[in-house]
Image: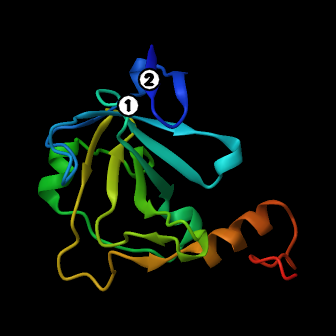
Amino acid sequence: MQIDTLRFGTVEVDETKFIKFEEGIPGLEQYHVYALLQFEDSYPLVWLQATEEKGICLPVLDTFTVLPDYVFDIDETDVKRLKLKKPEDLYVVSVVVIPDDISGMTVNLAAPVIINTATGRAKQIVLSGSEYNVRVPIFQEICKLVAREEGDSDASPVQET
């Protein structure tokens, strides 16, 4: 199926890969169906694109890829609502804020998006009593990850002139 996006134009998306938020995303409750768009040139960012509104596209990242020590509990009610049966069906992303100066990029670790890859059900959960913050600087960690992926352990995230 083709969906129109403001950022990427028209893209082809497999309908069976759509992600459905029963309650919507907090602040975007009226939109329930999204697609994850992945482009090589924006790694490790992925884009959570609303299929019903081309202007709604959230940058997200696989939290565990960038921050492998990230740990939290999912409430049993959410496990049932998402119909999670096995850990390998769980995919966790976190919303990223990208300001004009990308070195100020932050990630919301206090409200991860939980996706059941087997059913396509998803929910953004707010971690109660969590030590995680809504705006955690992430630019340095992303640069380290990209450098590791490219095999350049001496890479500096900021070019010096």
Amino acid at the residue labelled 2: Asp
Q: Which quadrant holds the C terminus? A: bottom right
- Residue 133 placement, left or right of 147: left
In terms of depth relative to the viewer, which is nearer, 77 or 126?
126
Q: Position of residue 104 (x, y in %)?
A: 53, 76
What residue is at 43 percent from the left and 21 percent from the top? Answer: 3
What residue is shown with label 2? 4
The percent coordinates of residue 114 (x first, y second) are: 32, 52
CB-based contact (under 8 Å), mark 2 and mark 1: yes
Which numbered tag is attached to residue 45? none
Q: Earlier in the sequence, mark 2 or mark 1?
A: 2
| Residue 111 position within the rendered picture, expressed as x and y whole percent measured from the top left | 29, 65
Up the image or down, 18 lies above or below 124; here it is above
Q: Give the CA separation, mark 2 to mark 1.
A: 6 Å
- How many other residues sit within 10 Å of disc 2, few (<14), some (14-19) or many (≥20)? some
As helix, strand or loop, the secondary structure at mark 1 comes to: loop
Residue at horizontal 54 percent and vertical 65 percent from the top: 100
Can you say whether 48 is above or below 9 in the image?
below
For the view shown, which residue lies furthest in the top direction?
Answer: 1
Q: Amino acid at mark 1?
A: Lys
Neighbourhood count class around disc 1 (C-alpha, 10 Å): few under 14, some 14–19, many 20 upward? some
Q: Which mark is residue 54?
A: 1
Tell me what residue is drawn at x 30 percent, y 72 percent. Answer: 110
Residue at 52% in and 71% down: 105
